[in-house]
Image: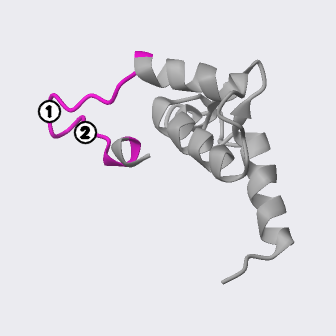
Amino acid sequence: METNQQTWDGIEEWLTLAVVEAQPHLFRYDPFAADTVDKRHGRQASPCMTAVGLLMNVYLGWDRSDPRLKNGAQYLMEHLPDDSTITKRDTYYWYY
């Protein structure tokens, strides 16, 4: 099954929007989230979304020596998933 170029371009465009400009190894869920108490967390980088963003960029061709990938991996090592209680377990983060 082939994926058309427009789809790949859209993926790359979204990842470019989701990256934190000042820290290009960190990713966020929704850079356009409303700046309200219940939504602004989407504007901030998180370990889960960083794991997703890094993996998607590996799929898109980032080389394993890319400094963004190395810095992102270091960030994830410093922010390992917490599974001390079932209510804190982030299955999405563990998956990526």
Badge 1: how crowded within 10 Å, few (<14), some, or many (20+)? few
Magenta stretch: residue 91 in it? yes
**Amino acid at the residue labelled 2:** Arg
Identify which residue, 41 or 22, lies in the foreground.
22
Q: In the structure shown, which secondary structural element does the residue marked by tag 2 occupy?
A: loop
The percent coordinates of residue 17 (x first, y second) are 77, 42
Magenta stretch: residue 70 in it? no
The residue stretch that appears in magenta: 78-93
Badge 2: how crowded within 10 Å, few (<14), some, or many (20+)? few
Q: Please tell me which residue is depicted at 73% across the width and 48% down the height of the picture.
A: 61
Q: Is residue 20 left or right of residue 29?
A: right
- Asked whether disc 1 touches disc 2, contact meaning CB atoms under 8 Å apart, the reply is yes
Residue extending farthest to the left is 85
Identify which residue, 46 or 75, lies in the foreground.
75
Task: Say whether residue 91 is visible.
Answer: yes
**Amino acid at the residue labelled 1:** Thr
Q: Please tell me which residue is depicted at 72% across the width and 80% down the height of the picture.
A: 2
Q: Please tell me which residue is depicted at 78% across the width and 25% down the height of the picture.
A: 21
The percent coordinates of residue 35 (x first, y second) are 65, 33
**Residue 40 appears in which quarter of the rendering?**
top right
**Residue 65 appears in which quarter of the rendering?**
top right
Question: In this figure, which residue is indicated by the disc labeled 1?
Answer: 85
Q: Is residue 48 left or right of residue 95?
A: right
Task: Say whether residue 29 is visible.
Answer: no
Q: Which mark is residue 19?
A: none
Q: Is the residue 87 above or below the residue 74 in the image?
A: below
Question: In this figure, which residue is indicated by the disc labeled 2?
Answer: 89
The percent coordinates of residue 14 (x first, y second) are 75, 51
Q: Is the residue 44 above or below the residue 9 in the image?
A: above
